[in-house]
Amino acid sequence: MTINRGTVLAINAICFDRPKVAHELQVVLEIEGDLESAIHSYCTHQFVKSSAKETLLNRYRQFDLARLEEQLNSFNINTVFYGENAYPSLLASIAFPPLVLFYKGSLSALSKPCLAVVGPRKMSPYGKQVTQFFSRHLSHGFVLVSGLALGVDTVAHETALKENKQTIAVLAHGLDTCYPSHNLKLFYEIEQNGCLISEFPPGVDSLPHHFPQRNRIVSGLCIATLVTEGTAKSGSLITARYALDADRDVFAVPGDIFSETSSGVHHLIKDGAALVTHPNDIFDAYSTLFPSKPNREEAPIRDLSPPEKVVLKALHFMPQHVDALRVASRLETPLLLSTLMQLDMEGLIESHPGNCYSLKA
């Protein structure tokens, strides 16, 4: 039988959390000719548990194509199907790619090389600095892809947008909502300056098992994945493993050996991920794509006073307490504080809670 748009949307609605089943059910459907019969036949031959079979059948019986199309129109959600020319070619090459991609914004964001930037929701100050530093520079050559989660994902998206560059967010739920709600403003900004992507139809909420599915799309869209920070159990390591399974490059930024938030990254490096300490390390790895490294235009910096030069030399990317800076700079406390305040006001350094300061990534 000919499988049309409505049939593919139906299969996706039935198997949105079972990509492998979606592909296999489509093959059975071509033989059976009827979707309900195909579900029965598939479940029988694959020894699918009765509870799982009932889930598939209930979703089939509840599926309403007209209602779905109305939702897509109402929320300005577009679709691209596996096998169509517009479907991302890199994603098409992974195991069991989504039959349908729902998106808001422009797929043209995928026209440039894409790089996944991932890390934990609960990042350290170091992880934030590293993510900002790499994202700021890499966004001038790559389109940055992440998952819109709090933490590293948010920092990567926001940094790209601040550089007036497109970014892509892959979500673990339907595009009729935004999770986390804290990122609603960022959600709309990415829609206007990039692309929001999901394999989940409208009405599907974010559930724990949806996030690994989301992560395989994040890595699948990209030529490589950069992990800026992560614990041994971080979801970012799942994304990295998907990338490795698809024979994509994985880059990892080392951190403090005593910090739990860097333990996962160090495991990745031990397992063969490329250690990187500067964005140029990644540009160098793709010298054929970037014969000359993309340069980020820096705003001209005024002539610095002697105290300002001393303070900048004493600062690191890791936040330092004022007391430590006073010792390192050998400046009197009033002069040190006024210098820090001036540099902070001009955006040359960053202030942190507890009278701590760091270089701006």
Image (spheres, rainbow, N blue to C red):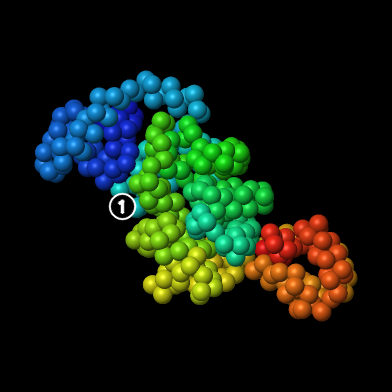
Instruction: Please tell me which residue lies in front, 160 or 269.
Output: 269
Residue 188 locus on image (x, y percent): 59, 37
Residue sitting at x 57%, y 54%: 156
Residue 112 locus on image (x, y percent): 54, 52
Q: Quadrant of residue 281?
A: bottom right
Give above or below for 58 relative to 282.
above
Residue sitting at x 73%, y 63%: 355
Residue 262 locus on image (x, y percent): 49, 68
Residue sitting at x 67%, y 67%: 319
Which residue is the site of mark 1? 95
Instruction: Please tell me which residue lies in front, 87 or 186.
Output: 186
Q: Quadrant of residue 240?
A: bottom left
Residue 5 visible: yes
In the image: residue 137, left or right of residue 86: right
- Element under disc 1: loop
Residue sitting at x 50%, y 75%: 257
Instruction: Please tell me which residue lies in front, 88 or 222.
Output: 222
In the image: residue 174, left or right of residue 298: left
The N terminus appears in which quarter of the rendering? top left
